[in-house]
Image (spheres, rainbow, N blue to C red):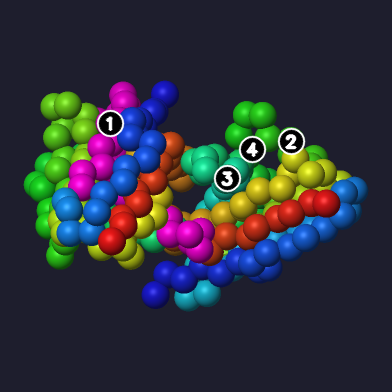
Amino acid sequence: GAVVSQHPSWVICKSGTSVKIECRSLDFQATTMFWYRQFPKQSLMLMATSNEGSKATYEQGVEKDKFLINHASLTLSTLTVTSAHPEDSSFYICSARAQGYTYEQYFGPGTRLTVT
Amino acid sequence: AQKVTQAQTEISVVEKEDVTLDCVYETRDTTYYLFWYKQPPSGELVFLIRRNSFDEQNEISGRYSWNFQKSTSSFNFTITASQVVDSAVYFCALTQNTGTASKLTFGTGTRLQVTL
C-alpha cells in the first residue's frame, strides 16, 4: 500500500517551453502533497506544499509563477514548470500524505527534467 | 528553525565492514519525528525508519540498527556487515508534528560506497 507514482520519469524539453509533471497517490487519498527539488549530489529542498482544493504554499525563494502547482483531486497533483530554462534542470520528487496522518509522507520515484 | 546535520559527506567501506552514519538535529519542538531514507542510484527514496521523540528505544531490523539519543539530539544509523547493495545516499530527516503544517527537513545526506 501507499504507492505514489510520477509521470513522466524523465523529460527533455527545449528552453522556453513548459513541462507538466504529474504526481498520483495510487491506493490512498492524499490531502496534502509536497514537491521537492534535488540538484545533483545535493539534498532535497522543499518547493511547495499543496492541499487539495486550495492554493499551494510556496517556500521562500520559489517563484510561484514559474512553478505552477495544482492539486485538483485527492489523488493528483501537478507541477508545471513554465518557460523552462537550463537552470531548471533538476530531479523533481513529489510526496503525498494520507488523509488523517500528520507526519508520514510517501515519496514518488522522481522526475528528471533536462532543459536544453 | 529546524536543522539536520549529517557531517559525513562520503564514507567508503569494504564489504562486511560495519558502518555508522551520524545524524544530529536541532528543534525547539517537544514533539517531533525522525526518519532515515535511502536513495539508491535510481533516485527513488526508500523509507527505512521513523522514530517519534517520545520513543528513545533503539531498534534493530536485520542488519540495520538505530541509536536515538535525545540528550545529544542524535539519531545514528548503523549497518552491520555491509554489502555492495547498501551503496546509496542516506538521508536523515526531521518533521514537526504540527498537524497540517508539518514539513520534512532533510540533512545533506551521506554517500555510502561499499566495495568488494
Q: Which residue is mark 4?
A: A58
> 10 Å neighbourhood of mark 4: few (<14), some, or many (≥20)?
some
> 10 Å neighbourhood of mark 2: few (<14), some, or many (≥20)?
few
Whether residue A108 is visible, yes or no, is no
Disc number at residue A40?
A: 3
Q: Nearer the viewer, mark 3 or mark 1?
A: 3
Q: Quadrant of residue A8?
A: bottom right
Q: Name the kind of residue labelled 3 in the image.
A: Pro
Range shown magenta? B19-44
Q: Name the kind of residue labelled 1 in the image.
A: Val
Label 2 to label 1: alpha-carbon separation? 31 Å
> 10 Å neighbourhood of mark 3: few (<14), some, or many (≥20)?
few
Whether residue A10 is visible, yes or no, is yes
- Residue drawn 37% across and 40% down? B10
Left or right, residue A109 beside residue B27: right
Disc number at residue A63?
A: 2
Q: Name the kind of residue labelled 2 in the image.
A: Glu
Q: Please say whether residue B22 is one of the residues in the magenta stretch.
A: yes
Left or right, residue B12 beside residue B103: left
Q: Nearer the viewer, mark 2 or mark 4?
A: 2
Element under disc 4: strand
Check chain identity for marks 3 and 1: say if they share one. no
Which chain does the residue under circle 1 lie in? Answer: B
Image coordinates for residue B93, horizontal then vertical, percent: 36, 42
Image coordinates for residue B54, horizontal then vertical, percent: 16, 41
